[in-house]
Image: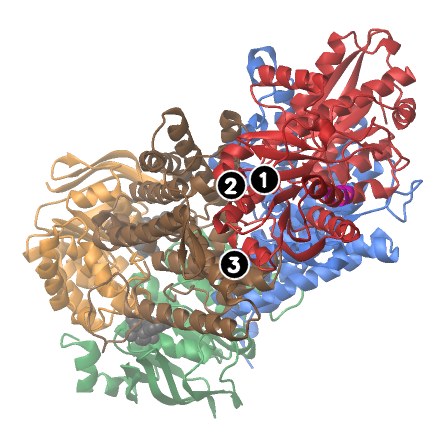
Chain colours: A orange, B blue, C red, D brown, E green
Amino acid sequence: MFLQLDSVTAGYRRLDIVHDLNFHVERGEIVSIIGANGAGKTTTLRAIAGLINTRSGRIRLDGEEVQNQRPDQIVKNGMVHVAQDRALFGDLAVHENLTMGAFTQPKSTIRESLEQVFELFPILRERRMQRANTMSGGQQQMLAIGRALMARPTCLTLDEPSIGLAPNLVAQVLEAIKRIRDAGVTVLIVEQNAAQALAISDRAYVMESGSIVLEGTGQELNDSAEVRKAYLGM
Amino acid sequence: MSATTESPRGTKLPSALPQRTHDGARRQYIYLAVGLVVLFFLPFVLPESSQPVLVRTLIYGIMAVGWNLMSGYGGMFSFGHAAFFGVGAYTDAVLLTNFGISPWIAMIIGAVFSAGVGVLIAYLCLRYKLAGSYFALATFAFAQMFLLLAQNLELVNRTEGINIPLLPEDSWAMLQFGQDSFNYYWIPLLLLAAAVAVTIAFVYSRPGRYTQAIRDDPVAAESLGIPIMKYRLITVALSCAITSIAGSYYTQYYLFVGPEQAFSMHVSTDAIVPAVIGGVGTIWGPLIGAAVVGPLSELVAAVVRNPPPFLEFLQGVSGLDVAIYAVLLIVIVVFLPKGIYGTIRERLRK
Amino acid sequence: GGGASAGAGDTIAIGAVHPLSGGLAGVGGMMNDGAALAVEDINEAGGIEALDGAQLELRDGDSQGSAQTGQSEAQRLISEGAVALVGTYQSDVTENVASAAERADVPMVIDVAVDDKIMEQGYENIFRIQPNASSMGQAGAETLAAMGETAGVDVEKVAYLHIEGAFGTSVSEAFTEEAEAQGIEVVSTVSYPATNFSDATTQVKQALSADPDVVVVTGYYPDNVLVAEAVQALNPDILGVFGIASGAFDDSSFPADAGAAATNVLSANYHYAATSERSQDIRERFEEKYGRPMETAAMLSYQAVEVIAAGLEESGSADPEALRDAIANTSIEDPLLAFDGPIEFDETGENKNATVIVMQSQDGEIEQVFPEEFATAELIFPARDQ
Amino acid sequence: MTQTSTETKEAPAAPPRLLDNRQLRIAAGLVVVVGAAVALMYLFGGQPSGLLTQSLITGVLLGGVYALVSLGLTLIFGVLGIVNFAQGAMLTMSMYIVFFLATEWGLNLYLAAALTVPVMFGFGWLVQSTVLNRVMGDSTHERPLLVTLGLSLLIINVLLMVFGGRPVSVASPVEGSINVIGALVDVPRLIAFGGALAVAVALTLILRKTTLGLAIRAVAANDVGASLVGVNVKRIYAMTFGVGATCVAVAGGLMVSFTSLVPSAGEQFTTLAFVIVVLGGLGSIPGALVGGLFIGLVQTVGSLYLPGSGSLLLVFGIFLLVLFLRPQGLFGAKS
Amino acid sequence: MSILKLEGLSKSFGGLRALRDVTVEIPEREFFGIIGPNGAGKTTLFSVIAGQLGPTSGRVVFDGQDITGWSADKVAGAGLVRTFQLMRPFESMTVLDNVSIASHRRFRSTAKSRDHAAEVIERVGLSQYLNKMSGTLPTAGLKRLELARALALEPKILLLDEVLAGLVPTERAPIIDLLRDIHRDGVTVMFVEHIMAAVMALSERLLVMHEGAELTLGVPEDVVQDPRVVEAYLGEDF
Ligand SMILES: Nc1ncnc2c1ncn2[C@@H]1O[C@H](COP(=O)(O)OP(=O)(O)OP(=O)(O)O)[C@@H](O)[C@H]1O
Ligand SMILES: Nc1ncnc2c1ncn2[C@@H]1O[C@H](COP(=O)(O)OP(=O)(O)OP(=O)(O)O)[C@@H](O)[C@H]1O
Ligand SMILES: [Mg+2]
Ligand SMILES: [Mg+2]
């Protein structure tokens, strides 16, 4: 098991948002977490990324316990997070954001990584001198994913990567995620676009009020009547 | 015309809704009245020598309440409140010494004048879209300019400052009493209470709510039809007027004002420190902060002056009292993130 | 307000308000020590005889350099029973403390504070030992003329450099007026700011551009050191640098601090009487006790306590009102400062015989050089190689 | 932190340089404006030209001192968003350390100054990592401000307790002055001026060319973002404050020989350093340098026409003007 | 009669032309959709109409009145209200206070404005959060709050910027119903949305923007057939 959560509890201030969470991601899988708004999906990813501390439980990455490590240590362990609010370097240019993404990487790899990102999102090449916070919502999303890829992660966690994207881009981004996985990266995504997310996922979990209530392969969940009704709006 | 008012779902909710605004305000007024009554009798129980400290604490309190309106509720961090304090202090001194105008009237004139100055400064800053640190530094620069102006203006006696002549006997009209008259305590106490009452009224009023909305998100507020400049300037005017009253009273109590006393950077920090220590953007924070900060340096100094036996070695080391005060200041700021009142309130809410 | 009268064997409290912390803490602390030493000496010599040997007690107040703190400290000391106050070094703080003392009818003896205005308020209870700003300006001009005469040097034109503000302006104005009467022309007057002043070259060059014989300087310590250094660097053809009420030129740190620039710099100022044995003895004991030299300011604090003690002896009562009257009528022979005569106060409370003498920085020491009666070393004038 | 521009997609991708074109343009513009003003003053200023020359040179040298003090401040302000009130006190502190090393250990002044650098770096690091890191985070600036205010009081009074309040001094191994076109140039001040340039270049190189610099710029732009690309944000905060303190150490070492050292000696620089930092643009190294020189010039040349503190009034007037017309500062990036 | 007329609106940021000569007329009570690739200028268009940004050239005519260059608060006061793509609650306030800030403009009396606010909150389905701090609302709640505040102003025309983004399908449905309801009450609605199911279900006419300009405008069924739209926006899978 590549990424594993053992009865993790986390939250803000005195409020627990997720309770006693158990799930895992195998190496080279795409796993998605779906669930209603406010279920605690973002909280889960933030805890994994080290942005908030867990209150109890264990998070293991490739066998090593990483709960309560600092975010930068987690990045160095190969797990990179794309936040829901993107956390871009707003005043810096696109290319600088990307270069910064490779902070933990040897300088020699930057050019190659840049090319790969530009290939995935050509608009970033076009706008590489533009300041990040003047890009449109969708453009910023692409930049955030691009920046994460610059760190050459072994495991990528994405919080609603398709939010605000044009339909053709949603397809593109999800396609890109598949390709990223195919290149050997393990992917954990949280998505509202449940149908499309399930379509590319190897496995998926359904989260409700801070706990996992269902799990299965992407296909299984997609076919489950319960899920279709509750999360796919069908 | 829009039709939402006749929306089919728009059922009336007559008593369902607690009238929190009025209740809230009323409760605050009651606290204020109770506090006022208790504090009124303080001089009877404290030794005479504590009066200067009490008065200074009250002056800090008024300044901090004023500062808090603009910076805490209005979100416009002023780092130059000395400008408004000083305008009040000098207006009082100049009107009294040159024209024999009663300090009470001078206080009002000073407040209006100071509000005008504040509005002008804030208008300039906001017009040019200064926010955050830039706004703070601009107000700071204005205060510094006022300091330099006062030092160079004949009207205010340049660096010499202005003395308020001593009167042979007590006079309510001229606001002068025997040195240890309790009036010197009760008057600022009432002024402070009035300032707090104004704050309560403002915070729960429509302009006050607009101001807080603008602080939280000016863009959203504007898009909801709130003229942000107007309400920001109203807040600034109130804030400056209150601060100015502290300045006027300062002149009356100390009977002397010079450029440093009126406009130095320390005056600005004197307004900020109590508010931050007590809790920014709360009604009671600045008061609690002033009650802590006002006597703090005195207490420390007293301890250092006559230390208990085990601290004997501290006696007479110059600078020690301020050093200890500084450490306490830092400790409070570090360990009480929302100020004393803000932190307590947060705990209680849970 | 005011303290209760003291009976036999009681202690009598004197309040001292000085800047014990903040930027002026150095000098403030030293002054406080000066006052403390005086109290100690008096107590050792048997206390106040007229009050059955009552002992004195010094209560410190820290003005922190701020007027309002100064005032509240004064009020505290008074309400804790101080029968008289000593202080405060800064003019604006003194204004506030004086008004507090006046209102409480407690006498105050100003040790250091130069502003003329303090005594112009018509206060009854306030006394000052040192000369005020304008009298120093005037005496400075007289002395400069007399000194030139004695040394046989013609001083015709002077340039005046002074710190901005009441102190600098009133000294310089009084000087200019008296200088004219003495036949000396002030050819240029340059003021410099009291804050953010860290290089005096431009101002000195500006003053020198009128080609004066002497550069006259009034200001505080750091700025006057800068002026001396700038004069040294510009190396003009002048007779010398002459401070009046300078905060630096007769300070014992000055020769080391300014190095070569201090050589033969003259300073007209009130000063402890280096020729008086009593004052020499006090200075020696002070240095032994506190590990630093006793500057004039501290001597004034010492003197101020003595004035109060003399008042207590005379009135035989610790009642502030009686004390006030006694001080107003006192006459202290053998003052510790180089004055024209005994310490006696006029009706405004100023010391009638307060005046300045001239010091000169010679070979790393501050020497008294003029007038003759106070001289500890020979005057070197012209003070610069021509 | 400041080199970004809002150029359009037509703009070619250029590698970041020490000074980009826009900054050079602004600098050139400023030189032209100041040059023209100076020329006018020579022609019609009504002051003797020797005096004017002297004031120009004094102004530039004074500006060097100002720049030196402002460099650390701009870094701390730009990256941490902290208005460091203790900057002046830290300056005094480093001067006292130099004083201590020079008098107690008998070290050469400049050697003592060099030893002060690591000490101050450590001090800055410690202050940030033990105290200031706890009050960062929430986007308000009042808490860090109060902490540095307290720190400033603390430093000054501890210095007072340790060294007393009497002025002390350290002699410079190089004394005297040289004559440049009729004006006098004080050698220790000239060295300080050189030091300011060197510090500015060194800082720029650190920010542009090193990994540390990259991390500092990332943290300045978005701290959560920086942590998500693998930057240890708290460590960078501490580093930055340490580097800011280091600048002050250099400043102290170079200035101590022409300063009468008392515990409050550095205070007067705090206010002007704020002005300079905002004038130059928050976080902009060239901005602090140019701003410092400019303010030094304005103050000194201004004093020829406005006696006493009048020239300071001019300084603040210009400050407000710049703030209104170009709030991002002369060298700041627009946002 | 048209309630909103855009005449040749252009907006440049430096050299970037975010809007190019947009000219549209929107009749009263229309449900008007806008789609387009990311960065096409949709949000910018809203900002220019609502007064957050001044246009580089062109005019905005609302209800027969030229409102070009009006400040945002004046535009809102006149009855043209927008919401934001990134939600902007007043975080220090409760949900009720958030909304009554807006209803205050209609009702001077505090009590009345609160009653009105409560009605609106009830209507958007946030009653259970009435006295909760707005900062703690989940995404769906924030979206509803954004909507409630706009509604409390009783707008004549509502500009909605991606109100459905970030909502799971089950959460979208009630909001879509709500929008229909608002429209039925007589409010003209312009909305930007990437969720095509909702776009198709709601819009009477659909504007497709591309690189700041109009690519096409028409009834949704036609528009989505347009190969240029498929190419630039929808993608082949659609
Ligand atoms: N900083 C915070 N402080 C307090 N509560 C928070 C904070 N952030 C989120 N919450 C609360 O935690 C709960 C879960 O939030 P979370 O963001 O994890 O949900 P989510 O599943 O990602 O939902 P969404 O689809 O809305 O993004 C919500 O009720 C939210 O209000
Ligand atoms: N303040 C600004 N400065 C410079 N460019 C800007 C600014 N605001 C927006 N832009 C640019 O204008 C273009 C249009 O942006 P806009 O936000 O209107 O896009 P959008 O159509 O709303 O996109 P999305 O669907 O992704 O939200 C984008 O290329 C964006 O980068
Ligand atoms: Mg989420
Ligand atoms: Mg948009």
- Residue placed furthest toward the left: A183
The three-letter code of the residue at mark 1 reads Val
> Residue tagged by mark 3?
D300
Pointer 1 chain: C
Residue in front for this viewpoint, D323 or E113: D323
Mark 1 and mark 3, same subunit? Answer: no
- Residue placed furthest toward the bottom: E1
Q: Specify the label residue C203 is tagged with.
A: none
E181 in magenta: no
List x then y, in percent, for residue E213: 30, 85
Task: Residue at 54%, 49% (x, y): give it.
Answer: C197
In the image, taking residue E32 as reference, residue C235 lies left or right, namely right
Pointer 2 chain: C
Task: Residue at 86%, 13% (x, y): give it.
Answer: C6
Above or below residue D21? Residue E75 is below
Quarter assignment of residue A201 = bottom left
Q: Residues within 10 Å of mark 2 (few under 14, many from 20)?
A: many
Q: Residues within 10 Å of mark 1 (few under 14, many from 20)?
A: many
Q: Secondary structure at mark 1?
A: loop
Q: Secondary structure at mark 2?
A: helix
Q: What is the quadrant of the C terminus of chain E in the image?
A: bottom left
> Residue tagged by mark 1?
C265
Q: For the magenta stretch, what is the residue range?
A: C135-140
Q: Residues within 10 Å of mark 3 (few under 14, many from 20)?
A: many
> Residue tagged by mark 2?
C261
The quarter of the picture showing ligand 3:
bottom left
Above or below residue B227? Residue D128 is above
C136 in magenta: yes
In the image, taking residue A182 as reference, residue E222 lies left or right, namely right
Which mark is nearer the camera, 1 or 3? 1
> Is mark 1 in CB contact (under 8 Å) with mark 2?
yes
